[in-house]
Amino acid sequence: MPRTIAVAYSGGLDTSAMIPWFLEHHDARVVAVVVDVGQGAEELEGIEEKALRSGAVACEIVDLREEFLEEFAFPTAISGAVYEGRYLLGTAIARPPIARAQVEAARRLGCDAVAHGCTGKGNDQVRFEATYAALAPDLEVIAPWREWSFRGREDLLEYLAAHGVPTTASATKIYSRDANLWHISHEGGGLEDPWNAPPEDIWTRTVAPEAAPDTPCEVILGFEQGRPRTLDGERLGAIELLERLNRIAGSHGVGRIDIVENRLVGMKSRGCYETPGGTVIMEALRGLEELVLDRRMLRWRQEQAIGFAELVYDGRWFTPQREVMQAAFERIAERLEGEVAVRLFKGSATTTRRRSPCSLYAESFATFSADEVYHQADAGGFIRLFTLPSRIAATQRNQTAAIAEGAGA
């Protein structure tokens, strides 16, 4: 049996049950590791006291908000990774830094094992354990949902009540939520039937688009090597910038999606996600790319983003493949400098203006008015060469048809 177990602790229903369960079934000391990735003060309030009252011998709270944005969220945004064309990977990008911090705490505190509260049906179990495997393969991994006899929410609530462990969860709080600075997800309850429209009270960071202001709002993001550094001309730290952008975009109904996605473990699941500030950042980056990347480079980045989205979704962050791919995206991001204006209106975020010192746009070439730099007659030779394969094929077809016609005569 392990001597000391480091638990990735959120204070939610699952992890609240884990601590007393470990004390009963593993005869071990338990250390709770709480990682702050921006889930909010409400979720973190009193969490240390709760962990200790539940039986943990210690509780470490690690503020990882800035690292989460700078090392994980912003690089993913630069890559353009969007899972299955819609999901901005809010939960997926948060799991590797949480698991990494848990491993580091386990090392400091001399733990023999690490544990998570993910179910055996979801993606997160893979994301946590892939990180453990990459960073601490010597530590034992314990996943209670794959061991204990509890079958669902009601069983856990009964267990906590019997052990006097406080929880804010209840049988009436039917939605499972995961929050960080980048997004919040909503799953479970009536959403499990994909024919049920999401009720309006499920959303927490965005107003309904139809209830958003009737007047559009414009925000201007300034980028340095693909990272957002200014908002409306004011230089801000990553945390403050995203928090402010979340509030502005959320008030205009920006960032909602309702998706049925393909989980890594094979099943489909339905979730509703809110990513207001992230949606604006992604839109602005795409608008900036249009200005500074040439056609072939843009297409290459778009093609690679599909694979990168799957890599991140699957929890393969701490792999050589991710390192190599991110290095390529960072090289591209050296040109992502400048400002982009994004118009927010009734749930939409649309680039309206952009400027960059790295711009490849030249009005003198693109203008429909008279110019002295582009000789339109040159296009004729270009088109003849561009269409050469088609003209050769057509000539051969015509020759073959003429021979066949002559033979028939």
Image: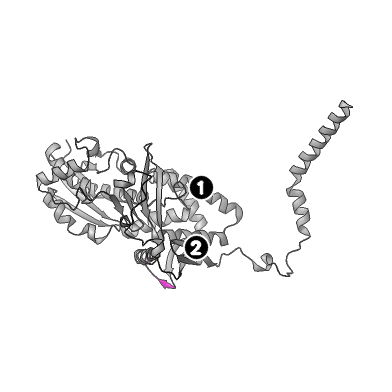
Image position, residue 316 (x, y; %): 39, 43
What residue sits right under mark 1 in the picture?
A: 304
What residue sits right under mark 2 in the picture?
A: 350
Residue type of the residue flagged with mark 1? Gln
| Residue 261 position (above or below residue 210) | above
- Point out the residue furthest to the right here: 409
Within-10-Å neighbours for mark 1: few <14, some 14–19, many 20+: some
Identified at 73% across, 67% down, the residue is 373
What's drawn in magenta, residue-wise?
A: 232-238
| Residue 119 position (above or below residue 221) | above
Identified at 27% across, 60% down, the residue is 40
Image position, residue 1 (x, y; %): 16, 35
Query: Can residue 335 be seen from the camera position used here?
Result: no
Image position, residue 208 (x, y; %): 38, 61
Helix, strand or loop for disc 1: helix
Horizontal side of 279 relative to 26 (left or right) equals: right
Task: Determine the CA span between mark 2 and mark 1.
Answer: 24 Å
Horizontal side of 101 relative to 221 (left or right) equals: left
Residue type of the residue flagged with mark 2? Thr
Image position, residue 97 (x, y; %): 32, 51
